[in-house]
Image (cartoon, rainbow, N blue to C red):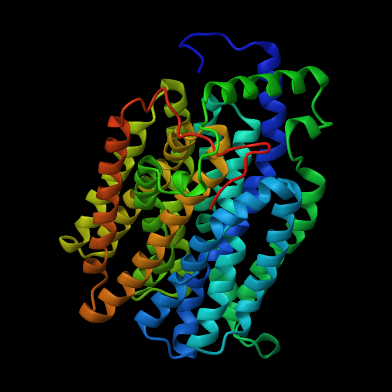
Amino acid sequence: MRTPGQELTPIETSTIRRISWRLLPFLMLAYFVSFLDRVNVGFAGLQMVRDLHLSPSVFGLGSGIFFVTYFLFGVPSNLLMEKAGARRWIAVIMMAWGLVAAGMATVKGPSSFYAMRLLLGVLEAGFFPGVILYVTYWFPREYRGRIIGMFSVAMPASSFIGSPISAALLGFDGVLGLRGWQWMFVIEGAPAVLLGIFCLAVLSDRPADAKWLSPQERTWIESKLAGEARSSHGVPGLRLWRVLTNPNVLLLSIVLAGSTAVSSGLQIWQPLIIKSYGLTNMQTGLLNSVPFALASVLMVWWGNRSDRKGERVWHTAAPLLLIAISLTAPVLFHSLSAMMVILCLAVIGVYGGKGPAWALSTDCLSTGSAAAGVAQINAISNLAGFGTTYVVGYIRELTGSYQVSMLPLAGLAAAGAIATLLVARAPGRRNTAIPALPSGNAPVRA
């Protein structure tokens, strides 16, 4: 990593700028669509819960069951991406999940609701971990906090922009005999198919394939990344399960669960929480967008600050503590204005720590273990989203209170903060990455 005060060379500046402008806008737009297709079920619930006679626990289970297949298929998808190439693999899964997201309009009851959410989880499983891995192909370590932060801003942006759009699409109710929630799924699923086609023209698999870089820029980035790879010493013949069950990988999974799973619970239930104060669908959509607007700005600033100071641990732990404290507050404060302040603080915490947390994770992974390690961390942290989404609905059904149902989310965020500090205390964390899987002729053993 660059020492404080060290000047950037002209070739580094031009290379990073060119790569960023080429890749980031497309990846951010793709992730915007991905996240919207995953969480728009929260707005659909404003109508479909009543139309399909779904109880809160059934709706919570169906919304969260997405993460079961997301968990199971994340690692295989990342390993396949390394073999097939990022450009083709990302294009295929985008087109496939877009069709399934639009197909959510055909849901008729609990069984078809569960089935479609499970299938969507299979197809989206490879996108986010695939992009995190893809970032390591193109950006040196000292840039990853801000790059992942900028990419991840698509998450809150999808709710900031998508909330009023989804609410407006519910107003299509009755057009051509379809309900508003059916129109919402069809219209919001279509962009993923179009972007999947466009992906083939925009992305390149590796810097060596990037004809849009000058020869000098290609040489610089390949040399820089190769030097970082040599500094991570792998263990020849390491079994795949040794990476997947590595204590630091498991701790990092808890760290990311503290934000990812909490995010899942809030994304699905937040519209219904706000709607419970007696608001219209459009009022709900506009208020729901406020926390995400704030988070969209602050997460980029926080990721830049983490890179500038070269510090990951407290830039990850502090936002998790903010989540834990804010989501405990609803048991004491019950007004709409208080709830909006609480949700703003929680959402800022959820997204503020994303960039530093993923930068911390990739710092702990050697080049050869990144595909499996990143996918495992993402898969486990998202599997916790299944639990949080269901538990919130179950507690709501049991107690009639959204305030009490927030407490498990607060506990998970606190656990993530503790896990961050445990990762920091791991012997040699700053100097020893999680060892690599074998490459070349050394087979990965199951």
Above or below, 106 relative to 308: below
Residue 117 in picture, x, y percent from top left? 54, 74
Query: At 47% across and 67% down in the image, what residue appears?
Result: 68
Query: At 41% across and 41% down in the image, what residue appears?
Result: 352
User: Which quadrant of the view contains residue 188?
Assistant: bottom right
Residue 128 visible at all: yes
Above or below, 151 relative to 50: above
**How many marks overall?**
0
Does 184 sit left or right of 415 as displayed? right
Residue 141 in picture, x, y percent from top left? 53, 27
Does 265 sit left or right of 330 as displayed? right
Residue 327 in picture, x, y percent from top left? 26, 56
Q: Residue furthest left?
A: 332
Does 7 sit left or right of 383 as displayed? right
> Considering depth in this image, is 258 or 246 the residue closer to the camera?
246
Residue 176 in picture, x, y percent from top left? 71, 88
User: Which quadrant of the view contains residue 417?
Assistant: top left
> Considering depth in this image, is 395 or 375 the residue closer to the camera?
375
Above or below, 4 relative to 326: above
Query: At 36% across and 33% down in the image, what residue appears?
Result: 315
Above or below, 211 relative to 93: above
Residue 163 visible at all: no
